[in-house]
Image: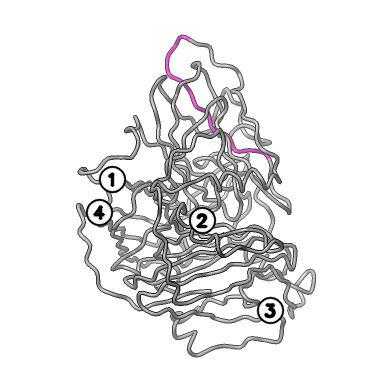
Amino acid sequence: MLMYNSIGCVTPLHALVRHSKFEIIKSSHTRLCSSKSMLTVNGQSPGPTIYATRGDLVIIDVVNRADQNITIHWHGVKMKRYPWSDGPNFVTQCPIRPGQSFRQRMILSDEEGTLWWHAHSDWSRNTVYGAILILPPTSHSFPFPNPHAHIPILIGEWWKGDVQQMMEEFLSNGDDPRPSDAFLINGQPGDLYSCSTPAGFNLDTYKLSVEFGKTYLIRLVNAVMDSIMFFKIAGHNFTVVGTDATYTKPLTTDYVAISPGQTIDLLLEANQPPSHYYMAARVYASGGVFVTTPATAIIEYGGNDYTAPPFPLLPSFPEVNNSAASINFTKRLRSLADAVEVPKNITKKLFYTLSMNRRLCRESRCVRETRLVSSINNVSMILPETTNILEAYYKGGNNGRSATRYATAVSVLEYNSTVEVVFQATNIAGGVEHPMHLHGHSFYVVGSGLHTQGYDSSKKHANGKRAIPGPTIYATRGDLVIIDVVNRADQNITIHW
């Protein structure tokens, strides 16, 4: 489901112009005793980190040297003045064809904190992704003591096979997609998986060196395809100070639950007896089959006055299906402002039911005679393949004869409107968690709860006062989530899941 508005003309001030070059190439990488050729940026996965300051203009020349179309999305950036650089192929831009290049621009108008970038075509983002670190301008400071260093930590996934081929098979035969073979921290699975190297060698393990008494800002990104992840560091607490490039009230905790596409900023104080400690990421899954072995990295204290253990201490995690641990962490987050002025006058209301359905499959190769499809209001989105989204919307298309129909669906919003969106997650065909991501804007979550219990609308304004604006929210099975969006109209709005 996509929501569109007209493009306004705003010229925010920018401090510096920063240039980068992204070359999309296929390169060979080995994990878990298997090698494969996969899409990367500059031969890296994760790709290069973009460092910038709020107000900067960032210019990235994307050169496609691969054999398939590609686009890059700047996840969480509002893309003011440059909506055609946002990344969704055939929505805000045409894909970059093999052998072609495209100059993408983004102004970091009010973003400050951690965001990320990733491919926005097919499942290419499994290997094509990286972090965006946005510092405050020199005239401002962090709302917390300056850290000794900024450490990007990106959680990803590894499939031994070709991800694009796996996706094509899943779409053609109607079977469920195969779960990944491992999770990754900064591109490495750690030493707990079968065929990974022992802790003493660390060939498959990312290592972070720290100094006792110093504080580090962990820039955590969940870049997995579709899983909430628990993240912990053995023997240490940390303090959450931001999420999705928005500062939060400090929250001291020993774990976080981070949704796919979300970022969280954590202050880690190296205050434990010098040794080696695991940082680890393990999946949260309310249903289905996932890899439950955690990805690990190692924190190494500096100095020569201690003997490192043969295996670092491993943190204890909540149970894989512990919904309370996931939900309670999110509910403890608070906006840095004591009272947030959320919109009061709603000009349009939208109600969306989110479902996983099975649609009749007419092709003989389908395994179950049906294929898995996701839908909003029982409509499964079809992106155009040869034209832009508005032309596809106005021309319409063949919807077939099924309870879940295919369509190119668009909601049109008026300039400067305030929209209340209600997401109702269902479990028609064995529901899963649904990430809801808004391009070009932030929104306020003003209410949520189980739909079986109903929602007290009188609490909406009170809930909104502590809401944290952001571009991504997660709806679990049976959830009812209410958000408010203000359409400022100097960029497009795209919502997808």
Q: Which residue is mark 4?
A: 56
Q: Position of residue 488 (x, y in %)?
A: 34, 70
Which residue is pictured at 46% across the width and 67% down the height? 69
Q: Which residue is mark 3?
A: 404
Mark 3 Cα-neighbour bin, 10 Å: few <14, some 14–19, many ≥20:
many
Q: Which residue is mark 2?
A: 463
Q: Position of residue 84 (x, y in %)?
A: 35, 71
Q: Which residue is mark 1?
A: 136
Q: Residue furthest front?
A: 458
Q: Are marks 3 and 2 in contact (CB under 8 Å)?
A: no
Q: Is residue 458 above or below residue 267?
A: below
Numbered range of the magenta stretch: 293-305
The residue type indicated by label 2 comes to Asn
1 or 4: mark nearer the eye:
1
Q: Secondary structure at mark 4?
A: loop
Q: Mark 2 or mark 3, which is nearer the start of the sequence?
A: 3
Q: Is residue 1 above or below residue 131?
A: below
The residue type indicated by label 1 comes to Pro
* Left-right relation of 80 to 273: left
Which residue is pictured at 56% across the width and 33% down the height? 254
Q: Position of residue 395 (x, y in %)?
A: 50, 90
Alpha-carbon distance for marks 1 and 4?
Answer: 10 Å
Q: Nearer the viewer, residue 363 or 330?
A: 330
The residue type indicated by label 3 comes to Thr
